[in-house]
Image (cartoon, rainbow, N blue to C red):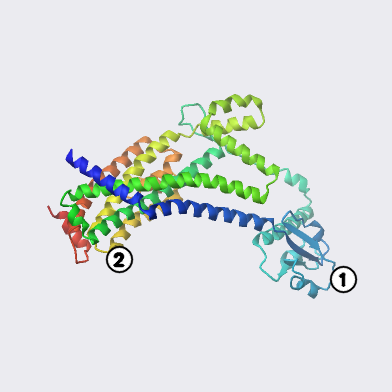
Amino acid sequence: MASKNKIGLIIRHEYLMRVRKKSFWLVGLLTPIALVAVGVLIGFLASVNKSETTTVGLYDLSGRMASRIEGDDNLRFVALDVASLPLDSAKVLPLRDDSFKGVVVFPADTTDDYSVIERGTAMYYNENVPMSVQGTVASQVERIIKDRKIERLGVDPKVLASTDADVSIRLVDVSQEADEQTDGNVVQGIKLALAFILCFMLYMFMIFSGNMVMTSTLEEKTNRIVEVIISSVRPFELMIGKIISSGLVCITQLAIWVVMLTGLSIVGVAGLSSVLGPDPSEISPQVTEQMTQTVAQTAPQAAAAMETAGGSSGEIAQFVAQLAQIDFLGIGLISIVFFILGYLLYASLYAAVGAAVDSAGDANQFVMPITIPLLVAFYCAFLSVENPNGPVAFWMSMIPLTSPVMMMVRVPFGVPAWEVVVSALLLVVTFLAVTWMAAKIYRIGLLSYGSKPTYKDLWHWIRMN
């Protein structure tokens, strides 16, 4: 009982000491503000950049292309007068007239298949031409040449267009209780988003909190405060207290970020919309999407009742029906288990490193082997999103050092129960073994000063009684 009280006191002391620091609140408050500000700035700049109209001149020596090139809201084509404007003057038009971003010159061509235009079209410019403009010009020229070649083959373009097909594969999960559980694009998109979010959160959480544990231990060891602390508590109790308190601090930090990011994002989007002045046609889909999300989270029965109204109500009902197929409870429970076990595993390793060394510089040689499995898991997570039940995803979710991150990717897409149980058991066994070794390194390393430890020294400390 006394041991539990000591661990509780350590957790309380470490937690309060960190959350009372000005740096904690500065990071907690300024980071979301900075992220939202950067996002709003990027959105504003992208909108401004998109709203700019680019003018391109068309110098058509063939007389076949200029009239068939079509512009849009952000790209305007101007046909130049070939008779009154010499070719050399047309090429340097962007130098003399800033309103022209470039001039496309179509060579004279009398061939039936437009082969000269296909090989000899060029764009002259003074400043870099946006890639989107180049792509638009190229695609339209290709379209015109393709239509001409089809026409020469004696095929009616309308007949050819009628052969186009648009196939939408309906995904049916036969493992569900219902006869047919269809996964639409919305469901797949949500699962993909959950996979990336969970994976990234766990990866950042373990790196951030692990370094916090190591730094805290290293500071106390450097200041010799630890010599006083371990006179009252055992090193293992101190290590467990630091690990749990650092986890609570990180969770508090994440909670602050989530609340602030949500609020600031709403304010930022609203402010950006008011500045840019969106059209009513653009506002309606935004409102509809927000209503859809609200209905999906709070009132799926209401959406089902609205299905008979038809139109958008039917679409909402269909969306909610698809959303209901995602097992958010199961995903949440499994994610929490691997989240906790993964954190405890890596936090104990970081605590051992902090106790073993005397400076942050000496810690690098021991931190790198710890971070390599995380980096490998994070990289394999991107590879496994496309095939979450493939061999890479399976084996990486069984290896304890990579399974927490990999399971975060696989869980939204569904993982067989036996794989979850086996992976969790392997992770628990590994955590207990690593904690036992880390505790021995922690116990001896806390009072080890003056020499830079090696891997041989660490192995010797683990073998000591």
Residue, far bottom: 88
Q: How many marks?
A: 2
Q: Nearer the viewer, residue 386 or 316?
A: 316
Circle 1 is placed at which residue position? 84
Q: From the image, state whether disc 1 or disc 2 is nearer to you.
A: 2
Q: x%, y% of residue 427?
A: 30, 44
Residue at position x 53%, y 42% from top?
Answer: 189
Q: Quadrant of the N terminus?
A: top left
Residue at position x 46%, y 45% from top?
Answer: 258
Q: x%, y% of residue 289?
A: 60, 38
- Picture layout, residue 53 above or below residue 177: below
Judged left or right of residue 58, residue 210 is left
Residue at position x 39%, y 44% from top?
Answer: 407
Q: Nearer the viewer, residue 28 or 295?
A: 28
Give the residue type at disc 2. Answer: Gly
Q: Secondary structure at mark 1?
A: loop
- Camera sees residue 430: no
Judged left or right of residue 53, residue 386 is left
Circle 2 is placed at which residue position? 361
Q: CA distance from mark 1 to mark 2?
A: 73 Å
Give the residue type at disc 1. Answer: Ser
Judged left or right of residue 327, residue 37 is right
